[in-house]
Amino acid sequence: MKRLETDALWTAIDEYMSGHLVTSDAALYAALDASEAAGLPRINIAPNQGKLLWLLARATGARRILEIGTLGGYSTIWLARGLASDGRLITIEANPDYAEVARANIARAGLDRQVELRVGRAQDLLPALANEDPFDLVFIDADKPNTPGYFQWAVRLSRRGSFIVVDNVVREGAVLEQKGDANVQGMRRFFELAASEPRVSGTALQTVGSKGHDGLAILLVTTGP
Ligand code: DHB
Ligand code: MG
């Protein structure tokens, strides 16, 4: 099949599956609408991926979640809804304009008490989190060249049994390009680090759908406090 046909098919199947299994409500639709109206790039996760994050939060009984890369807060809402009743989520966004949109979206979803949005570069903000309790679940979905560093921080900020999820690990196959751009190098370096990091054990899955051909890595932290 030609590329356009496969994309349309993947999107139709995403819609079919989500139509059955993924309930999006007014707050989720409004978050996407407000993000689009504000001119944010349409690089939010898909609804069925959001539901996967919710499932992971529920499955792990997450009480502390860290998200690196808030964008408009769409994934934040999915993750925060999966928190245990007394749980908290910290999300980091470098772009103050994106953060403003996200703040309104999170408030509209009624999650502003559970979610703390920190505005700044993650490299600058992550060290302070080392003084806090470890996170049960970390979702990395920010600037791709810095993903290796974010992964190292995620391991450091985790405990035994924490999960780390990394978005965009395939990038339409570009991950195979040894001389790829900085985004590709970031993902390739992430894979090298994950492979050689004795404290984690994980896997990665290719995804197709409304977000094209990409992938998610899911890693368990197997040692630590
Ligand atoms: C891009 C970033 C993402 O996090 C994503 O899911 C898709 C695309 C991007 O920067 O192009
Ligand atoms: Mg992403």
Image (tube, grey):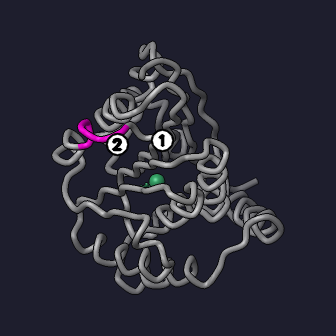
Residue lying at 40% horizontally and 64% vertically, measured from the top left: 115
Residue lying at 79% horizontally and 71% vertically, measured from the top left: 19
Instruction: Pick out the residue farthest to the front.
Output: 86
Foreground mark, 1 or 2, reads 1
Q: List x then y, in percent, for residue 92.
A: 30, 56
The reply to whether callout 1 and callout 2 are in contact (CB within 8 Å) is no
Q: List x then y, in percent, for residue 72.
A: 40, 70
Q: List x then y, in percent, for residue 109.
A: 51, 78
- Magenta span: predominant SS is loop
Residue 81 falls inside the magenta stretch:
no
Please give the residue where the numbered disc 1 appears in the rendered image: 166
Q: Label 2 sits on what residue type?
A: Asn
Whichever of labels 1 and 2 marks the residue nearer the N terminus, that label is 1
Distance (Cα) linking label 1 and label 2: 13 Å
In the rendered image, the vertical position of residue 65 relative to residue 148, given as above or below: below
In the rendered image, the vertical position of residue 13 relative to residue 138, given as above or below: below
Viewer-proximal residue among 97 and 213 = 97
Quarter where residue 194 is shown: top left
Viewer-proximal residue among 28 and 11 = 28
Q: Which residues are magenta?
A: 129-133
The answer to whether one can see residue 181 in this image is no
Quarter where residue 134 is shown: top left
Q: List x then y, in percent, for residue 79.
A: 53, 58
Residue lying at 56% horizontally and 42% vertically, measured from the top left: 216
Position of residue 187 in the picture relative to residue 49 (left or right) = left
Residue lying at 36% horizontally and 57% vertically, measured from the top left: 91
> Which secondary structure, mark 2?
helix
Q: Is mark 2 within 8 Å of ligand 1?
A: yes
Circle 2 residues within 10 Å: few <14, some 14–19, many ≥20: some
Q: Label 1 sits on what residue type?
A: Val
Give the number of marks.
2
Please give the residue where the numbered disc 2 appears in the rendered image: 183
